[in-house]
Amino acid sequence: MNARYLRGRLAAACARAFAATVAGVAVLGTLAPAVARAQGVSWQETGIRIESVEVRVRGLESDPKREALLADAVRRTLALYPTGAFDRFFADANLAKVRRLPDVGGAEYAVLPGAGGGLVIVVDVEARPGAEAPPAATGLLVMEPGAKSPFPTLWQRGDTYLKLGLTSAINFNFNDTAWYGRPGPLLDGNPLVNGPPGTGSFTEKSAFVDLGAYGITPVTESLYVYGGASFLVSASHGQDLFESRDRTYGAFEDGYVGLIGGTTTARGDRFVWNVSGGRKKFSIGDGFLVGATSGSGGERAMINYSPRWAAEELWLAEARWNVAKLQLFRIDPDELVEIDTGTRVDGANLEIDWSPRLKLGATHLRVPESRQGYFLPDFSRRSREGLRVYGARFDWLPMRGRPGAVLRGEYAEQRHADFAMRATGGWLQAGWSFADARWSPQVTYRYAALSGDDPGTRRYERWDPLLMGISPWDWVQGMNHGKVFGNANRTSHRLQVELRPRPTVQLISQYWEFRADEFNNIGGLGVVTTLSSKDLGSEFNLMGRWFFARHAFFQAQAAFTQPGPALTDALGRAEKPWVFFNTFVRVSF
């Protein structure tokens, strides 16, 4: 295939992407109610990286010096840092400390989507009475000076803090022509199948409740012990992608203990360390290398929503010195019983907040145990056990609220201790944030490449997804297509447009073009071991979120996926597109 053809195809794809994106934004605009005064946002944010932290102080406008000192005291007490992973329990516990600062009359925080896929933490502080301005709405939150520890706090005395953890969602899914109308060959031999769907449309309704308690208490002035536990019950009714039977399943989700301590030197350098063990969620960056540490579906139900995130075991040691963070960890993923590979992952992760705009990271992973295998062109098998992964990434993002370039990327290589292997995975995203324009549009293009195995070489080159993926808006590439082809042996072009009509309304549209890296596809779909074409298809996604309360939000999303010749040739008649729609309401405390 010559370069001129590829350039022409990419140009045509981008033109279709732009037209489809504009149309999609118009459709999603009808889903997003106008909110004149909302109280903040909350979604599946635990474990997601923090892009920036903004502290806003009210009531000290006439005393800038005191205002700056109070803002600094709030930052140090809240202990939320860029490049760190957000943890709602620690944020709530430290917010309780902020409310007890001498000059603070009230405080709240909001969690907003960031320009680079992470989180922006906005902290609103009301100075203690005596300041000129009375309590007022901030546009995101309503301040209550003098309020100590509102619900969900269960107990607080001094630095001892105990809170209720409650997360729940009601979810509805609609599919038409799932698996491109060919569920038989695409699901043949899949251990999750227990009543596959037909070739028409079907629906599923599901829900979950995750209830628990989380606490922290001091051992010494600079050493704290903390822990948490929760029990999650999930249920599905109707036909999903693999099953027709109704299911209800309950099991522990969180269950961990830890120690955290630190100090601030006379020069102002801050050192914080944290060790923990047990059942807990863990991810790195956007989930390109580590994101999916638990599984949903099968007997656990809710395969489309995926409410379970905690690894079966996570042993984590973390140290932060000012803007640098080092993590050492072992992960035993909570895999589904039907497809449990017995994989363990050891790793080290380093992140540096190099400047207000530039963030750097590097990760090393090794697999000491696994039953998962790789299949070579002669169908001989090699073990995942012994896999080594080396990765580096960067983020160049505009300052919050300002226009500017968005440039992000990541590259990783996979080697093996016992045989010749060199698999590569990487991505580069570029675009522009028009933060000063109406609805703050952001337009980005991302190219990603995950290698396939070339049968003409002696080494193995197919990318191993390992723990890759968080959601269809991160590293599950395509809401429908990702279920068919997986994160290996493919390249993708993605054009994305994001709009913010209100701080609490987020609209995203995406257009994807998928291609295979190699014609050899052994290790992927059993029915498609050799591809006749590298054209895998395209997908158009729409998503709208409305954060209508600090602890709740509504989301609707849809996908329209067209198979390419690589799939239609292998499956016979698979020309019909796959249409998917999903909507849910989620509440979290």
Image (spheres, grey):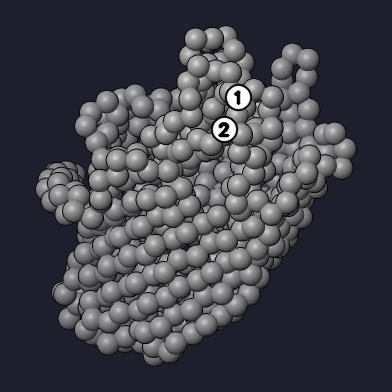
Where residue 231 appears, as percent x and y from the top left, is: 63, 69
Residue count near mark 1 (Cα–Cα under 10 Å), binned few <14, some 14–19, many ≥20: many
Tell me the residue at 22%/70% (across/down): 579
Can residue 161 be seen here? The reply is yes
In the image, residue 564 lies at what x, y percent? Answer: 20, 66
Badge 2 vs badge 1, beta-carbon distance below 8 Å = yes
Q: Which mark is residue 145?
A: 2
Foreground residue among 359 and 149: 149
200 horizontally vs 408: left or right = left
Which quarter of the rendering shows the C terminus?
A: bottom right
Q: Nearer the viewer, residue 532 or 143?
A: 143
Residue found at x 74% / y 46%: 156
| Residue furthest right as drawn | 220
Mark with earlier residue (2, 1):
1
Look at the picture and state if 64 lies above or below 466.
above
Does residue 23 sit above or below 335 in this rendering?
Answer: above
Snapshot quadrant of residue 531: bottom left
Snapshot quadrant of residue 445:
top left
- Give the amino acid type for the residue marked by disc 2 in the picture: Pro
Query: To which residue does mark 1 refer?
Result: 128
Image coordinates for residue 548, horizontal then vertical, percent: 37, 50
Residue at image location 22% in from the left, 78% down from the top: 177
Residue 52 seen from this side:
no
